[in-house]
Amino acid sequence: MKCPFCGTPDTKVVNSRPANNGDSVRRRRECEVCQARFTTFEILEKPTQGVIKRDGSRVPYSRERLLQGIEKACRKRPVTGQQIDTLVSLVEKEAFRNANQEVTTEFLGKLVLKRLKEVDQVAYLRFASVYKQFRDLEDFNSEISQLLKE
């Protein structure tokens, strides 16, 4: 692993421990040249999974893309990066539980909405507005009414 400070390839692992409920490994590293310390995360590279979009096209699953969508919904909300990472891990685990190679965007969206509702209701509404393609204030009003009932 290259040092992000001086670029030398000589770094050593100082400490390792599980992260994200055991789904990844957090490694504390130290550069052998400049002695700077930094953290890396190691995650299991899963077999290539695909996503079937609304129009029927198929694209490779991208954790980054899912993460970006959730981060946008949570922007300026009291939701930590750790909560978002955990949410993404839980959605992935549930979506690809049975070693399915493909899932629909509809299924992924429902999983995200279910988890976001537990974390932050405003972020839930933001994500729902894009996922459910709200057209006007009435769509928002209807979703808010549903939230209030629950």
Image (cartoon, grey):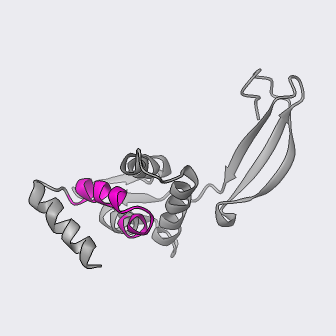
Report the front residue among 118 and 6. 118
The image position of residue 66, as x and y in percent, is 43, 52
Q: Position of residue 24 (x, y in %)?
A: 68, 57
Asked where in the image residue 95 lies, by quadrant, the reply is: bottom left
Residue located 47% across and 65% down the image: 91
> Does the segment drawn in magenta span residue 123?
yes
Q: Magenta part of the protein: which range?
A: 113-132
Q: Is residue 43 left or right of residue 138?
A: right
Q: Is residue 23 above or below residue 94?
A: above
Quadrant housing the C terminus: bottom left
Residue 53 seen: no
Q: Residue at x 29, y 54 (%)?
A: 126
Q: Is residue 54 visible?
A: yes
Q: Residue at x 27, y 71 (%)?
A: 147
At x 74% / y 24%, what residue is drawn?
5
Looking at the rendered image, the quarter that the N terminus falls into is top right
Residue 41 to residue 35: above or below: below
Q: For the stretch drawn in magenta, what is the main secondary structure?
A: helix
Task: Point out residue 129 in the picture as x, y percentages from the top left corner.
Answer: 23, 56
Q: Is residue 140 above or below residue 75?
A: below
Determine whether, in the image, residue 118 is placed left or right of residue 141.
Answer: right
> Is residue 129 within the magenta segment?
yes
